[in-house]
Amino acid sequence: MQVHGGLLRVRSAGVLLLGPSGVGKSETALELVARGHQLVADDVVELFLENGRVMGRASEAIRHFLEIRGLGILCVPDLYGAGAVAGESPVSLVFQLEHWREGTSYERVGLERPTHTLLGVALPCLVLPVRPSANMATLEEAAVRDHEQRSRGASGAEKLDARLRGEMKR
């Protein structure tokens, strides 16, 4: 299966960036690479199942290249070194980037994580509105840290919920 998006290794997570053309997927990928994370694929991500896990990679023809409007085609290992790219990665988390729409209700608490199904596997998915003042790379790094914390036990939302419930009992 192929999807229009980007795939990166951010800390311990494979992050799939989805969204309409021009929303900022490649620019976000470039910022994450500049922060020390690894590019797996830009523009077209080939997805496949391996031992029940969704895996992703770039096609051989465009592997390790990023297309940035206004700059053109960038060869990531030439600019950031061989460690800035990875051949493939499991997909751990999906980010659905969309243009900010006034009046749209976006998640603000995060007790439950919606999912996005790829190749029959449900993966945690976050819808992130892109605004001119938003730093998507910072938001995605924070989301990956939260994802890691959730996998070890409790999220910040769960901790706050427990605290507030305790206060209400008093």
Image (spheres, rainbow, N blue to C red):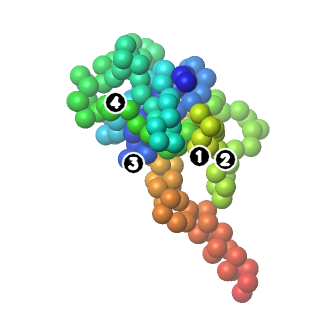
Separation of residues labelled 4 and 2 (CA atoms): 28 Å
Which residue is under mark 3? 12
In the drawing, does residue 54 fall left or right of residue 118?
A: left
Which numbered dot is residue 70? none
Residue at the bottom extreme? 170
Looking at marks 1 and 3 on the same chain, the residue that comes earlier in the sequence is marked by 3
Q: Which residue is mark 2?
A: 114
Q: Residue furthest right?
A: 103
Label 4 to label 1: alpha-carbon separation: 23 Å
Residue at 66% across, 33% down:
100
Badge 1: residue crowd in 10 Å (few <14, some 14–19, many ≥20): some
Task: Give the answer, above or below, for where 130 lies relative to 149.
Answer: above
Give the residue at mark 4: 87
Q: Which residue is drawn at the image coordinates 52% and 66% (left, top)? A: 153
Q: Do the numbered discs 2 and 1 sit on residues whose CB atoms are within 8 Å?
A: yes
Relative to 43, does residue 87 appear above or below in the rendering? Answer: below
Say what amino acid the circle numbered 4 marks.
Answer: Gly
Q: Are marks 4 and 1 in contact (CB under 8 Å)?
A: no
Residue 80 falls left or right of residue 105: left
Residue in the picture at 34% in, 35% down: 38
Label at residue 124: 1
N-term-proximal mark, 2 vs 1: 2
Image quarter of residue 131 = top right
Instruction: Locate residue 61, reporting x and y percent.
Output: 37, 13
Quote the CA–CA distance across marks 1 and 3. Answer: 15 Å
Q: Which mark sits nearer the N-terminus, 2 or 3?
A: 3
Q: Amino acid at mark 2?
A: Pro
Q: Secondary structure at mark 4?
A: loop
Q: Amino acid at mark 1?
A: Pro
**Residue 46 placement, left or right of 32:** right
